[in-house]
Every structure is written in C-alpha cells, then in structure tokens.
Image (spheres, rainbow, N blue to C red):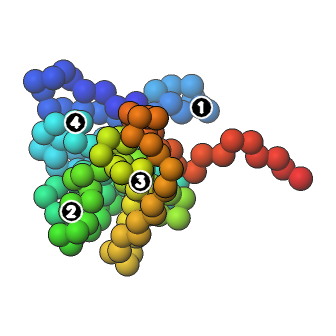
Amino acid sequence: MVLCTSGYSQCSWVIFYFDVRSEKFCLINNDVDIPPGIADHTNSLTLLNYKGKLGIMKLREREVVLWHLEDATSHKWSKHIYILNPLGESIVTGNKFVGMTSTGELVWSSYSSHGLSNHFHVFFYNLERNTFTRVNIKGFRHHSVRRIHTFIDYVENMKFM
C-alpha cells in the first residue's frame, strides 16, 4: 500500500495498491466511507494490519477510530469507535503507537529511555474488552540508549520442521 498526499497545505490523500495479477496500480476509493475531513493532518492517521486487512487508525480526544478495508475492489470500509477511559487516554497520548498484534490488540510503547528510571513499558489495548495491559521491561540504563524502537510480531529466525 502507498499513501500519497497532495502536499503540506492540502488535506486530500489517496491509497494505491499493486495488483500482482494484472501488474497495475489500482486506486482505493477512501471518500465513500471515510469522511474527507478526517485527515486534517495526514500524520494523524496510521496505516496498520487490521486482522489481515488494511486498517487506518485515528486518535481523536478519548476515542480510537478504526477503519478497515473489507474489500479493495468494492472500496467498502467498516468503521469502529472505541472509547478510552481517562487512564487509557493518558497512555495513548504519552507513548508511541506501534501497531496491532495478530490477535487484534493495539500496542503503544515508551519511545525514549530518558526519565524511565530503568523501565520500559509496552501497553496492549484489547479492543473487545476495552482493557489495557502494561508490560514492564527492566534493564534499560539512562545512558545506554536514547531512543527505543518497538516492533510487532518480529521473528528473527523461523525454522520450519
């Protein structure tokens, strides 16, 4: 998928995909189910893998708004809104969004070791139960790293038997 914007001052955006069978680029119509004003700042939208389908996430006040593409040829999008409690709101505004796990949980993490007191946090948000799970990872020293990158479903070496 390729996200194209029409420039800094313009607020329009398009999504292309490459059809391997026809060897052509195709445009996904996003104006049908996604309001055009939703991308006031395209950097406020995040593309993600939503249970094997293209998803778009936008954080809006205390809401996580998710669209997922049901069918690329018919340009059908589904929208889901999840209301965060005040604790959840502070988690998503104070941490970096990482992505969605294969089990359907949204993930945020600390993005810097500065001021972490040797702790690094990863937060998993279960959409269905509307709950956050915090995982503390100890061992980061203040002077050892400045920025921390977190990846979802990363596998170093997978051997098939």
Q: Alpha carbon of mark 1 to alpha carbon of mark 4: how far?
A: 27 Å
- Residue 153 position, x and y percent, is 57, 51
Which mark lies nearer to you, 2 or 4? 2
Marks 1,4: beta carbons within 8 A? no
Residue under label 3, please give it: 119
Residue density around tag 3, few if under 14, some if 14–19, many if 20 or more, within 10 Å:
some
Instruction: Say what amino acid the circle numbered 2 marks.
Output: Glu
Residue 42 marker: 4
Work out whether mark 4 precedes mark 3 in sequence or the reverse, and give the earlier one.
4
The secondary element bearing badge 4 is classed as: helix
**Which residue lies at the image location 21% right of the left edge and 62% below the top edge?**
89
Work out whether mark 3 precedes mark 2 in sequence or the reverse, and give the earlier one.
2
Residue under label 2, please give it: 89
Instruction: Say what amino acid the circle numbered 3 marks.
Output: His
Which mark lies nearer to you, 3 or 1? 3
Q: Alpha carbon of mark 2 to alpha carbon of mark 4: how far?
A: 21 Å
Work out whether mark 3 precedes mark 1 in sequence or the reverse, and give the earlier one.
1
The secondary element bearing badge 3 is classed as: strand
Q: Quadrant of residue 84?
A: bottom left
Instruction: Say what amino acid the circle numbered 4 marks.
Output: Thr
Residue 122 marker: none
